[in-house]
Structures are given as C-alpha cells and as structure tokens.
Amino acid sequence: MHLSDFSITPEVLRILPLAVVIGGLAASGALGLLDLIGLLTHLAYYQTVGVSLVPPTTAKLGAWTILIPVVGGLIIGAMAYFGSERIRGHGIPEAMETILVGGSKTEPRLTVLKPISSAVSIGTGGPFGAEGPIILTGGALGSVLAQFFHLSAIERRTLLVAGSCAGMAAVFGTPVGAVLFGVELLVFELKPRSLVPIALAVAVASVVRDVFASHDLMSAVPLFPVPPHGAFSAVAVAAAAGVGVAAGLLAWLLTTAVYGMEDAFNRLPLHWAWWPALGGVVVGVGGLIDPRALGVGYATIGAELSGKLALESLALLLVVKLVIWSVALGSGTSGGILAPLLMMGAALGGIMGSLLPGGGSTWALLGMAGAFAGVTRSPLTSIVFTFELTHDTGSLLPLLVTCAIAHLISTVILKRSILTEKVARKGFHVVREYAVDPLEALFVREVMDTDVVSVGPDETVIEAHERVAATPGTARQHLVPVVDRNDRLLGALDVARLDWERRNGRAGHATVALLEDAPVLAHPDEPLRRVADRMAEQGVSALLVVSGDLRGMPALMGVVTVEHLLAARQRELVQERHRERPLRLRGWSGLRTDPVASEPPST
C-alpha cells in the first residue's frame, strides 16, 4: 500500500518558481532573436532599417547577393574561433550533449553568442529556422539560472529543457507540441518532476507571446492557417500512408546529405573557421536560382500549404533548399533545422499531391508533418505540432497515419536520426525508447533466495567458514546472516571477508560477533528498483530480506543479490523473444489452448 504510481516528491515545488522565470526569459529571448534576424535581413538585402521578418531578395543587388552569405559565414567562423566552438550547429544535438554528459551545465556566454551567430547566419540568407538557436538559447538561459541555485543535475536538466521548450512555444505558438518536443527529444523521461515544470514554463512563454501579439510573426493565429478539411476517405487515408513512406525516405536523404557534407568539409585542408564562408558561396548561388530557399522561409511554407506554388516551383524549391541547407549545415554554421524540414516536407507533399486525390495543399500539410516525424523521430510531437500550426482538426487521422509510417520507415532504414548522429560521432549514445523499468514490475519476494545459510553469534570464524564452505551455492549468497535462536537478525558477515579472515589466520578462534556488520536490509514487498538503488547508494551487492519493522530485530526471510536483479531483465527477454501460439484450431471443435506452447522456455 505504500507504493505509488509516480516517483515525485515535494522537492519539485522549489523549481516551479524558477520555471516561471525561465519561461518569461526564454520567450523574451525568442522575440529578441526574431527582431535581430529581421534587422539583419533588412540591412543585408534591402539596405533599410526594420525588424519585421522579410524574405531575402535578389531584386536590389542581383548577383552581388552571393557575397552576403559569404560575409555572414566569415563572421560566424570568427565568432566560433574566438568565442565558443559550441555555437556551430543547429542547437538540438548540442542541447542533448549538455544534458547527457555535461551535467546540464551550459556556458553563460552561449546565451549571448548563440543567438547573435544564428541571427547573423539567418539574416545573411542562411537557409535555417530560428527555432534551433532559440531552443539552445532558451536551454542555456535555464541552465545558467539553475546554476545559481543548489540543485541536482536532474533539476538543472529539467530547467534547461523548460527553457528550450518555452522558446519553441514562443516562436511557433504551439504549447502542447513544445512540451511533447521536450519529452520525446530532450528530457529523456516522462515523469511529473520534469513534465510539470516544462509545461509551466511553456505556459508562461505562451502568455508572453500573446502579450506581444503585435509582432509580425505572431499576428497570425494559427501561424500557418489552412482551409479546413472534412473527413478523409479510406483511399485518402491510404494515400496518407504513401506520403509517410516518401517522408521516411526523405528523412534518410536529408540525414545522409547533411553528414555527407560534414564529412566532405572535414576532409578539406582548411581550418573549420573558414568552412561557413565556403558554405556561404553555395547558399548565395542557390539564392540566385530560387530566393525562396533563403532565410527562415515562413512565408514560403505558408504559400506551400495554401497551394499557391506550381509543381515546377515546388520541385525547384525542394532541390535548391536541400542542397544549400545540407551544405550550410555541414559547414558548421549556426541555424535551426525545423523550419527547413517543414518547407522541404511541404514541397514533397505538394509534388505528390499532383498525383493524389484532393488539393495539393492537403498533401503539403501531410508531407510537412511526415518530414518532421521522420527526421526527428518524434511522431507525437509532429502530429500535435502540425495541428497547432494549422488548427486543422479534419487532418488528424491522416496526420496520425503519415507520421507513424514516416517514423517507421526512418527507424528501420536509419540507426540514428539527424539529431542523435552528431552526438554519436562524439562517442556517446542516446536511447530514444521509453518503457517501464522491468525492475519496477518484480518484487523482492519473487526472486529472493529463501534457503539461506546463517550462523550464530557464538560460533567461531573457523566454524562459520566451514559451514559456509560445505554448503553449495553460498558464493552467490554474498552475505552470511548472523541470527539468534529465534531467527531474529543480529548482523551479517561478508562471505569474501570470512574467507579472507580464515586464510590469513588473523581471526583465530574469535567469534562471529566480533566481525559482524550492520547489514543493509530489504523488505519482501519492495520492487527491485528500490533494491537496486539501495545497493548503488550503499556500495553493496546483496541485501538481507526481513519481515516486520526494519528498524528493530526483524525475522530473516532470505537474501537478494545483484544476480537476482537480472531475473527481471530475463523475464523481459522471454516476453520479447519467446513466440508461442496459445490458441489453435482443431477441426470443428473450436478453439483450444495449447498447454505446452504457453509455457516459457526453461532458463
């Protein structure tokens, strides 16, 4: 009766006020970054002063616009070389790395360098979105603020992710999608201790966003309004699965292209600080071919979802965006990947829409969501995120099909995503699967040994050693309980120490009572997870299992060891790998249960 569904404690309440502050700071930082991007775009491409988000254009400078991304690349290379190399990249893998191996401690200077470098990159035509830098910047704000307080690494991680998700919600106006993004991609758990602070920070950021609704990006609610869709037919839902397959293949193409470009730049005989400028040459040429591929591209995404682009325009946009985006990202410049994914996915869906029933805008919407799901491996986030961007309830069923299939194809053909590949290349591994710990499903009473060799307090060390040595299987026992005549536990002897004392002859005829230690105890109704935690905390490999009050003189019931913890994993492996057919058809006699097939294999 003392067990609970969730491992949450009142200590989580002390980080909730910090989550509120971080939500406001992240939203303010996101708005400031958008304004800075707008300002640099105005200066670079229009030679005017303004903060509205305008698309880069070649109308005023013509071929000279090729130099704009090159200059931006030079500035970013210098900032990375003299400031911090961690500003390179699109932000999410860097946040993952900080969480996994950095104790969720971010350098304070990243809160300044990352947004400025990203604004320079995007403002000078870089084919990126603002969300990646905002995710890293918001996370840096959360981490830096958390470092001023006496918090654990897990609490710092929660606040880091809270800042990241708050920044994402402030840009796109997708609060639920932002929370799911944090759960599926960053926080590596689904627990109240992290979910609640993240949700609170996102809520605050969303309120701040509404306060500044006059901002040009935030004036449209939703961000990408589309005509409402009615019920999809069975044929249309099947076609949505086809879009999911194509989106999964696109995820493979994009991931391969980005890291192929990164490998190509690594082979150059030049310092990495020059790479963003070289990538800027390709970006500039691509901008001459199709200027819509430059910059954040929110207006272009809206045009795709509205069906305003012809088939030829969609095909050109997809190819140009893919090339300049993969080259620029492979060169190590600074910028986000979400907006480019939305643009390229929408272009793919629009192209497929020319062969599918209904309007092209419908399939552009599904392609956009499928690309997001396939590349980031976050299907639930993709569904909710797309819905919040469009408020199109009629598309939820095909969105579910497309995102699930895209996720399936991506996970089958790619070992790692575009996000985790970068972390893996630095020697770390990210596990993206969440499941109930098998140690939580088994109790001590189910695995413990009850046939335990015990000794009395008046026995000599030599007598105790002879009894233990004469009993088979005591090596796995690890501990020898010391009990009185009523089997009440008095203490314990380590088996290895008992053997050492006998071999070295130091104990002589000393009694067991002189060597016994206070054992670490377990209760038969405890889950194995608590036992594993206690073993790790105390540095022991075995616990004595007792009944009654653990603080008194409880009765001995058995022993649980490290080997017993493997029983939980063994049971899970049987459930995963043992295939059976409990029900069989036998003539016309109906269904019968096969008693042999239903038994698990012997271990």
Image: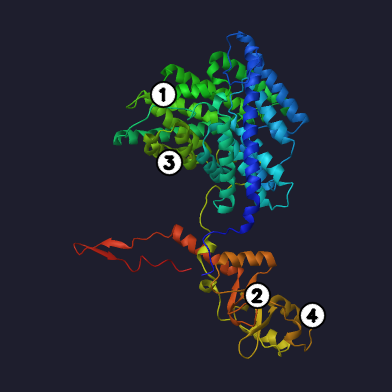
Residue projecting furthest to the left? 588
Element on which disc 2 rests: loop
User: Is residue 401 shown left or right of residue 342?
Assistant: left
The figure's colour scheme reads: rainbow
Amino acid, disc 3:
Ala
Image location of residue 101, percent across then percent down:
68, 47
Between marks 2 and 3 in the image, the one whose residue lies nearer the viewer = 3
Q: Quadrant of residue 79?
A: top right
Q: Is residue 534 above or below residue 552?
A: above
Q: Which residue is mark 2?
A: 478
Of callouts 4 and 1, the N-terminal one: 1
Q: What label sits on residue 456 in the rendered view? A: none
From this view, report whether residue 390 is shown above or below residue 507: above
| Image spot of residue 162 (x, y percent) | 61, 43
The local crowd at label 2, few if under 14, some if 14 to 19, many if 20 or more residues have their Cα within 10 Å, is many
* Crowding near the residue tagged with mark 4, few <14, some 14–19, many ≥20 C-alpha atoms within 10 Å: few
Residue carrying label 3: 404
Element class at badge 4: helix
Marked residue nearer the N-terminal end (2 or 3): 3
Kindly indicate the quadrant of the structure image that contains residue 117: top right
Q: Which dot marks residue 351? A: 1
Would you say the residues marked 3 and 1 are in contact, meaning their CB atoms lie under 8 Å apart?
no
Q: Mark 3 falls on what kind of element? A: helix
Q: Are marks 2 and 3 in contact (CB under 8 Å)?
A: no
Report how far apart the C-alphas of labels 3 and 1 lie in the structure.
21 Å
The Cα–Cα distance between marks 1 and 2, rounded to whole angstroms, is 67 Å
- Across and down, in percent, residue 499 comes to 72, 79
The residue at which mark 4 appears reads as: 504
